[in-house]
Amino acid sequence: MTPLVTLESRAVPLLRDNIDTDAIIPSREMRSVSKDGLADGLFAGWRYTAIGGREIDPAFVLNQPEGKGAQILLGGSNFGCGSSREHAVWALAEYGFRVVIAPSFSPIFQGNCIRNGIAPIVLPREAVEQIAAGFADGTPVTIDMPSCEVRMGLAVFPFSMEDEARTMLIEGADAIELTLRHRAEIEGFFARDAAVRPWIYLAD
Amino acid sequence: MTEGPLTLAEKIWSAHRVMTLESGAEVIAIDRLLLHERTGGVALKSLEEAGRTVMHPSRVFATMDHIVDTFPGRTDKTLMPTGTAFIVSTRESAKRHGITLFDIDDPRQGIVHVVSPEQGIILPGAILVCPDSHTCTQGAFGGLAWGIGSSEAEHVLATMTLRMNRPPDMRVTIDGVLGEGVTAKDLALHLIAALGSNGAKGHIIEFAGSAVRALDMEARMTLCNMATEMACAGAVIAPDDKTFDWLEGRPYAPKDEVREQAIAAWRALYSDDGAVFATEHRFDAAEVRPMVTWGNSPQHAAPLGAPVPADALSKADQQRAVEYMAVTPGQPVAGLPIDAAFIGSCTNSRISDLRRAAAILKGRKVAEGVKAICVPGSTQVKAAAEAEGLHEVFLEAGFEWREAGCSMCFFAGGESFAPEARVISSTNRNFESRQGPNTRTHLASPETVAASAIAGRIALVSEIAA
């Protein structure tokens, strides 16, 4: 995973509440047993003029010239609700997003972001709206993970994030590798627990 | 264990704590991992590509439900030409890693949250995860169950643990008695409408109170199923004799002396008096009415016959939903003509759901022009329904009778309702284009779906009686 320490980019506003993962990547756009090849299907229902089509809808914010190359997406509350499909995050990542800022996230989507090097940053709605207002004139936004700040011009928006998640993002760490360092503790737990809850432990 | 009164979720969590990390997060033992062909196959593939193995294959189960077709005589082929790869890849990976698979032709096959309880895979006090958001369904059995992503599933495959901070606790207490004809689905929609689509804010919800204890196990599953539509981190109901009785004799549930030992332990699974919840909500079951959704979020729900909010056009998300759904603020959705009716999904596709719908359909016909489909939640549910003759009731009424799977909940396999079709559906999500291009989904109980299919418009059961 590519570490995410600091980043400067424009921030694209898509401030609808309850943007669900069906909207981020529709079922019909998930075509292979793979984490790749999904960027084209990102927001397909909104980005193109017809369902299943590929004709660009110029009115959609990602298609506006100011949105090109942006690495920060601004969303409404409960962002990423619905299906747990990680394809939503893979599509965002492949498209180029490294940060999503919203007043709240669906818990599963939030976890999926962290596992894929995307920072899900929670800021109050007013702050998200203030950042969104800078989109039209191209004001760059800075993400500073070590100091837990989003900055735009003179405005500073502090955010909080669980240490585990923040460290994983900053270090670009592989969670499985880190956990497997504790293999002995894990196996020890299962050995003790099997005596307490034998009904859990089926024969391998 | 921590001192002092504990919540149910805290008791289960503590019993699974392997260690606390420097970050404050914990390594939590996972008892059961479930996979399906859409999000599970990719986790197995990614694990293989990283050169890793499955730590405990005996505690991992896979089923085919999300991509597979539900037409009679189905094969690995799906309407969507790209579907076959998901099915084949999941099957081959499961075989390579010694994971139990409920394949297309297996009598145990079905929707993951229907088959896991049927097989006794979820148990009280257990922690079960699955890369599927409706995993919280299984908290109905007094275990902790929640949806994860494919990367987290890969982490569980490799380590049989997750690294997490414990989510905060919320208790939703529902006392009183549900009215005649009011179901767990109506209760769930009532709660979501009241608390909002973000109402659970990442908490584990414990459903408690006399109305919850009065629900049978299948109704408890329906209630817990919909909890994810409030952004919960899991849902749980304290297990009781109904739970233990329901699990008796299930293939992977404990038997004989081990069962006795397990039940003794399971009887301690309740929130202690004085346990502190970060958030508490109380509801009166008597206030719940048959519900239907009018918009594009499950929170856009109202009693059947009640109007779409008159001020909907003044709120951004509601305005968009009103336009998309082609409904009128101040007017009820009841009475709107429908193009299709769907009974199925992990919310409402179990035998009791089908029995209640069939009781309404018996001796009646689906209105002309309405495409009506019933998809049993599992091959076992299908067999049980057929043994009772329920399939004949559905077929004679004009419903299609399908093989088990997720089906038209989200156009699995590439099947969809017609563009802009108005669908009354026993499923869990009314999102834009979820059941087909620009489809207009109205969520309701199986009873309301059956009654509406007969009436040809969104209707209460009482409207078609006599």
Image: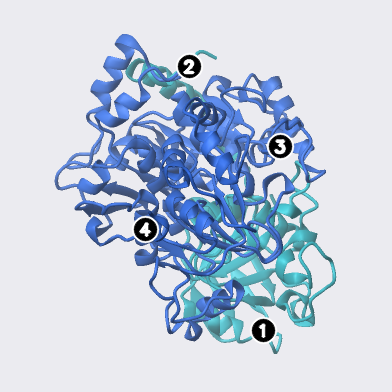
Residue furthest out toward the bottom: A137
- The subunit letter for the residue under badge 3 reads B
Horizontal and vertical percent position of residue B322: 54, 77
Q: Which residue is mark 1?
A: A135
What kind of residue is marked 4? Answer: Ser
Q: Residue at x 63, y 77 (%)?
A: A13
Measure how far apart labels 4 and 2 are at the Cα level. 49 Å
Horizontal and vertical percent position of residue B288: 29, 60
Chain A, colour shown? cyan
Query: What crowding class fits label 4: few (fewer than 14 Cα within 10 Å), some (14-19), or many (20 or more)?
Result: few
- The subunit letter for the residue under badge 4 reads B
Q: Quadrant of residue B219?
A: top left
Which quarter of the rendering shows the C terminus of chain B? bottom left
Viewer-nearest of discs 4 and 2: 4
Which quarter of the rendering shows the N terminus of chain B? top left
Q: Which residue is mark 4?
A: B462
Assign a secondary structure to mark 2: loop
Chain B, colour shown? blue
- Mark 2 and mark 1 lie on one chain; the one further toward the N terminus is 1
Q: Residue at x 36, y 34 (%)?
A: B141
Assign a secondary structure to mark 4: helix
- Mark 3 and mark 4 lie on one chain; the one further toward the N terminus is 3
Q: Which mark is residue A202?
A: 2
Q: Which residue is mark 3?
A: B46
For the residues beneath circles 1 and 3, the answer to whether they share a chain is no
Residue furthest out toward the right: A55
Residue B254 appears left or right of B315 = left
What kind of residue is marked 3? Answer: Ser
Query: What crowding class fits label 2: few (fewer than 14 Cα within 10 Å), some (14-19), or many (20 or more)?
Result: few
What kind of residue is marked 2? Answer: Leu
Horizontal and vertical percent position of residue B17: 38, 34
